[in-house]
Image (spheres, rainbow, N blue to C red):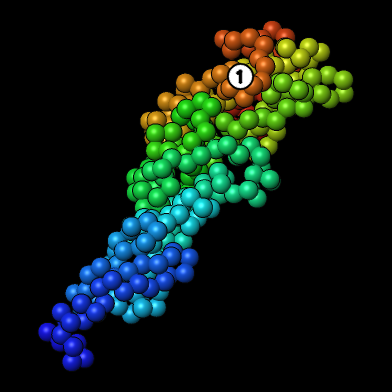
Amino acid sequence: MEYCGVSVKDRSDKLVGTVYNSGKFGDYEIIYYGSVEDVLIRFHNTGYVTKSGMQRVRNGGVIDKTLPNVYGVGYSGECDMVDIRKNRSYVVWNSMLKRCYSDTRHFVSPKYAGKTVSSFFLEYSNFHEWYTDQKGHDLGWDLDKDLIVSGNIEYSPENCVLVPKEINNVIVKDLSGVSDYYGVHLAHGKFRVCVQYMRKNYHLSFHDNMDEASETYIFYKQKLIHEVAEKWKGVVSDRCYNALINYSVIERIRGFGMKTYLDIPTDIPDFVDKSRAAPLRGILSGSY
């Protein structure tokens, strides 16, 4: 077989070992030549081997799919999609890497500093396969790493789950206006208890004692999470539902290095101002 009057064997003998440069992916060399559309090349930096056409090889257009080029750690892997950046899974993957490895993001949101991504998730093709297998991926649900494992700092298949925005919002930490206590704010010389739900703060009660305010917050926060869990039962994955039912507000607060007053009460504390405390059904229905 000949190409432009030159046999494939002669052309192969000439081209094998030829080195080209791909810019940011570094040098690669031809290790096999079968035809103009059947060329194997190997990247010098990583040893990654891939097949390409001769024109792309000459133009330096071959991509090393194992070289980290997203925030210095992420790489595409073997993806068949033409433009992965338009895929929802890629947007979520890129955002996850940005939270963990972007200095700019850490400057704006220091809480993400120290968080990591597992080696499995650093390869986009792996993440895409996991993501599209999760319940809610086609509904735009949020990627959550904190619900399954308390105090978790690593995004991984074992630790992550997709959750609706309502669930993601209800397990968010309520900011505190009083040092060491979540959900408790100083207002008019008293301790005010607030619970956040769907990005709105709901005022529950005023207290003269900070410990009583903390107990009230824990009670209502726990009850709200359980009611949201029941609302989504059968819709979210079993992992997500079970994690919500077993969610301990006290353990999470302690995990954040914050203080709690006592264990979760089984009934509404006697000192709760029942005239101001919001019934959870009212919060869930939006009538409060």
Q: Taking 269 as reference, is 49 above or below it?
A: below
**How far across and how far down the image is residue 175, in percent?**
70, 30
Quadrant where the C terminus sits is top right
**How far across and how far down the image is residue 144, in percent?**
50, 38
**How far across and how far down the image is residue 136, in percent?**
42, 44
Quadrant where the N terminus sits is bottom left
**How far across and how far down the image is residue 268, in percent?**
63, 12
Mark 1: give few (<14), some (14-19) or many (20+) Cα within 10 Å: few
Q: Nearer the viewer, residue 269 or 88?
A: 88
Q: Residue furthest right?
A: 188
| Residue 197 as seen in the image, left or right of residue 43 | right
Q: Quadrant of residue 197?
A: top right
Residue at the image point whose x is 69% and y is 46% from the top: 108
**Any part of residue 131 in sight:** no
Residue at the image point whose x is 79% and y is 19% from the top: 191
Q: Which residue is mark 1?
A: 254
| Residue 81 as seen in the image, left or right of residue 113 | left
Residue at the image point whose x is 19% and y is 74% from the top: 34
Q: Residue furthest bottom?
A: 5
| Residue 258 as seen in the image, left or right of residue 140 | right
- Amino acid at the residue labelled 1: Arg
Q: Taking 54 as reference, is 47 above or below it?
A: above
Q: Secondary structure at mark 1?
A: helix
**Any part of residue 29 in sight:** yes
Q: Quadrant of residue 77?
A: bottom left
Number of disc labels: 1
Q: Taking 214 as reference, is 14 above or below it?
A: below
| Residue 266 as seen in the image, left or right of residue 31 | right
Residue at the image point whose x is 48% and y is 65% from the top: 24
Q: Residue furthest top?
A: 270
